[in-house]
Image (cartoon, grey):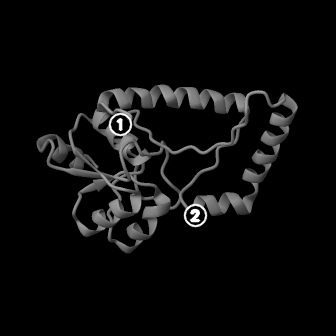
Amino acid sequence: MPEFIAYSKANPNKINMASGGLGDPGHVAGELFQMMAGVKMVHVPYRGAGPALTDLVGGQVQVMFNAIATSIEHIKAGTVCALAVTATERSPVLPDIPTVGDFVTGYEASGVYGVGAPKNVSVEIIDKLNKGINAALADTKLKARLEELGASVLLGTPTEFGKLITDETEKWGKVVKFAGLKAD
């Protein structure tokens, strides 16, 4: 990763960064990296992460910020070289791979999935759903399977999830402004 950052700084706009499309998680993770590392790469949007990953494996593009679940087999096979993971901690499925944050202080880009409900649903129902979902996610078999795919489980309350959404919206809004992204 330090060599990649140094090369990127010395060669602005000479590295092609693939993504699954404009504004997809890999695209904005790459834009966050550019913003925080002070590098400039050329964004190459594809119609989905699959074709982008195919071109990364084939050498048509040089870098891609992609989900571990869809990259892990290529990493294990040696057809893709993992430089770093974008989460705050190393992945259990790639324990030898450092985090981007080890080299770019404060960097973190993780996909978050959650369950929402209309705002007029009663607190009792929300609490019951929250307890049930947290119990299911705490199941050792499900948790182990998610970890095999490179995911980690985040349990919490509806209030904590709401704060996470607010914080992430603010963070990614700054990245969108930095990158000059516009809705079509």
Query: Residue 167, image x and y in percent?
Result: 53, 27
Instruction: Report the disc number at residue 148.
Output: 2
Looking at marks 1 and 2 on the same chain, the residue that comes earlier in the sequence is marked by: 1
Q: Which residue is mark 1?
A: 32
Question: Left or right of 60: which side holds 18?
Answer: right
Q: Quadrant of the C terminus?
A: top left
Query: Between residues 74 and 25, which one lies in front from this camera angle?
Result: 25
Query: Residue 24, image x and y in percent?
Result: 42, 46
Instruction: Name the secondary structure under disc 2.
Output: helix
- Badge 2 crowding class, 10 Å Cα cut-off, few under 14, some 14 to 19, many 20 or more, is some
- Residue at image location 76% in from the left, 45% down from the top: 134
Query: Residue 146, image x and y in percent?
Result: 62, 59
- Residue at image location 47% in from the left, 45% down from the top: 87
Instruction: Name the secondary structure under disc 1.
Output: helix
Quadrant in the rendering for residue 46: bottom left
Q: Amino acid at mark 2?
A: Glu
Quadrant in the rendering for residue 145: bottom right
- Badges 1 and 2: C-beta atoms under 8 Å apart? no
